[in-house]
Image (cartoon, rainbow, N blue to C red):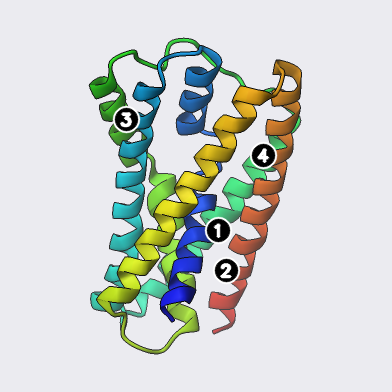
Amino acid sequence: MIIAYSLAGLVSGFFSSTPLGPINLWVADHRLSRLPLGTLLYFLTAVIIVDISFASGALWGHFEVWEESQEMKWVGVFSGIFTSILGLILISKARNNVVITRSTTSLNKYSSFLQGIVLTAANPAFVLFWLFVANQIMSHIDKTLTYYELISFVCGVVIGDVLWFTFFTFILSKFSKKSQDSTLRRIRLMVGIVFFVIGATGVITYVLK
């Protein structure tokens, strides 16, 4: 089960970071502006810290607080609907160019860290996404969550986050501007489809229970 939790965390962490919103636009702005790598690392460290906090909080809360709560069914439905809507939004924007501004990043590593905390913590999409993931995991197991399983899940999330941002920065560093735009639109379309499918599937699963 520990391996299963690690894989679940890896996949969830990867997809939690993929929507091309403020965080990824900050990263894109940073790399295309050729700013120092140190500020990017501080920013992403902050993003990952908040991400795993939301992930572990949602999963732990399900097992320790809300496990027997009927209201959590409706949390699952709502978060599933949100995930589907987010998918539709990404699909609708897939044909548009990714707008990258030049005023989002900072040369100071500490302010970059603070920006990462604020942009992630103030984003309700992260909270709802992890509530949805926790609901899905909860619906497929019938035993108490152990600390080892929670830790393995969080480690998987970290790996998933790192994999996505490594892949994303590689695209930004290696491809031409035209190729970047085309590749990012394809990524946005694929991520949108995945979000819509898993969100709709989750809603249907909870409604039919």
**Callout 1 environment at 10 Å: few (<14), some (14 to 19), or many (20+)?**
many
Residue located beneath label 3 in the image: 42
- Give the alpha-carbon distance from disc 1 to disc 4, as whole Å: 19 Å
Q: Which label's residue is closer to the chain start, 3 or 4? A: 3
Provide residue 14's location: percent of width, then percent of height. Answer: 52, 51
Who's the residue at 54% across and 51% down the image?
15
Q: In this orientation, which residue lies closer to the viewer: 86 or 49?
A: 49
Q: Which label's residue is closer to the chain start, 3 or 1? A: 3
Residue located beneath label 2 in the image: 203
Q: Find residue 81 and name its label.
A: 1
**Callout 3 environment at 10 Å: few (<14), some (14 to 19), or many (20+)?**
some
The three-letter amino acid code for the residue at tag 2 is: Val
The reply to whether dot 3 and dot 1 touch (C-beta < 8 Å) is no
Who's the residue at 36% across and 44% down the image?
48
- Give the alpha-carbon distance from disc 3 to disc 4, as whole Å: 25 Å
The reply to whether dot 1 and dot 4 touch (C-beta < 8 Å) is no
Provide residue 27's location: percent of width, then percent of height. Answer: 48, 27
Q: Which label's residue is closer to the chain start, 2 or 1? A: 1
Which element type, helix, strand or loop, lies under badge 3? Answer: helix
**Callout 4 environment at 10 Å: few (<14), some (14 to 19), or many (20+)?**
many
Who's the residue at 24% across and 77% down the image?
64
Quarter of the image for residue 56 reads: bottom left
The three-letter amino acid code for the residue at tag 3 is: Tyr
Residue located beneath label 4 in the image: 188
Q: Which label's residue is closer to the chain start, 2 or 3? A: 3
